[in-house]
Amino acid sequence: MDIQSLFSVKDKVVLVTGGAKGVGRMISEAFVRNGARVYIASRDAAACTSACAELNALPGIHPGGSAIPLPADLSSLEECQRLAAALAARESKLHVLVNNSGATWGESFTTYPDTAWTKLLTLNLHRVFTLTQLLTPLLEAAGQSSKPSPDGPVTDPGRIINIGSIDALRVPLLPTFAYSASKAGLHHLSRHLAVELGPRGVTSNTLACGPFPSKMMAATLENFGEEIKGANPLGRIGVPADVGGACLFLASRAGGFVNGATVALDGGVSLMSKI
């Protein structure tokens, strides 16, 4: 199979939650540049609109590539329901769902508040399940459309890509208790979804991301950026091509048989002992 078709996402319909900023924006751009129709969901409606305008103005976009704003507060059940209904009104199938929206909270163990747990478990874990559940019919439709015959196998399944964290693979140095726990839950939820939805023609995989330049990481990188780079076997932090490329692989025919995997996208830093 030639590389153009093996890694193609042309004409696929993609939803990226939290797709207007940070890692989500990197993922959105990768799909838009390569010919996908990308819906960007974010609580910040102005950021959604601005990001889509900037992405649509990029030079050299593959034909068919576009970004459409679909703002929503993904911590809310009602907003998830509204987003799913709005997408279903526009599209008959969803090829790729990227669950990227998330938040973090760092505070000492002694003062770590109850509200942090409520906020992070809801957004980082609970609503990932909610939105995936609501959008599963569209994801199934994408997979079913790839069957060579009514009774044949799904050859290009619907894809769920969950953006996790290396903080769910090992205990972080920073006191981000609810964040690391919520991401560990997300990793296992992703495996559970792989088993549940695989027979329905939908795969579920996780990218356990290390440090990337983003608003969430801004303060940490400003204070400890050189130490973080120095601790990485590759001597750097992630760049847009790293997370964009990983998502393109998982969303393309090349990644069609990957299901239930957790890929550490961190340059190997999660392998390093801290003792």
Image (tube, grey):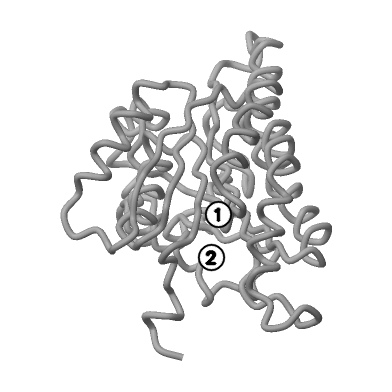
Q: Which mark is residue 207?
A: 1
Element type where label 2 sits in the image: helix
Look at 71% across and 59% down and name the residue there: 140
Look at 24% across and 58% down and name the residue there: 61
Tag in front: 1 or 2 = 2
User: CA–CA distance between discs 1 and 2?
Assistant: 10 Å
Q: Which mark is residue 250?
A: 2
The image quadrant that residue 108 belongs to is top right
Answer whether labels 1 and 2 touch (C-beta < 8 Å). yes
Count neighbours of disc 2 (C-alpha within 10 A) and say few if under 14, some if 14 to 19, many if 20 or more.
Answer: many
Q: Nearer the viewer, residue 147 or 233?
A: 147
Count neighbours of disc 1 (C-alpha within 10 A) and say few if under 14, some if 14 to 19, many if 20 or more.
Answer: many
Look at 63% across and 27% down and name the residue there: 82
Which of the two labelled residues, at mark 1 and mark 2, occupies the earlier sequence position? Answer: 1
Please state which amino acid type lies under the numbered disc 1: Leu
Is 260 on the left-hand or right-hand side of 16?
right
Q: Position of residue 184 (x, y in %)?
A: 69, 42
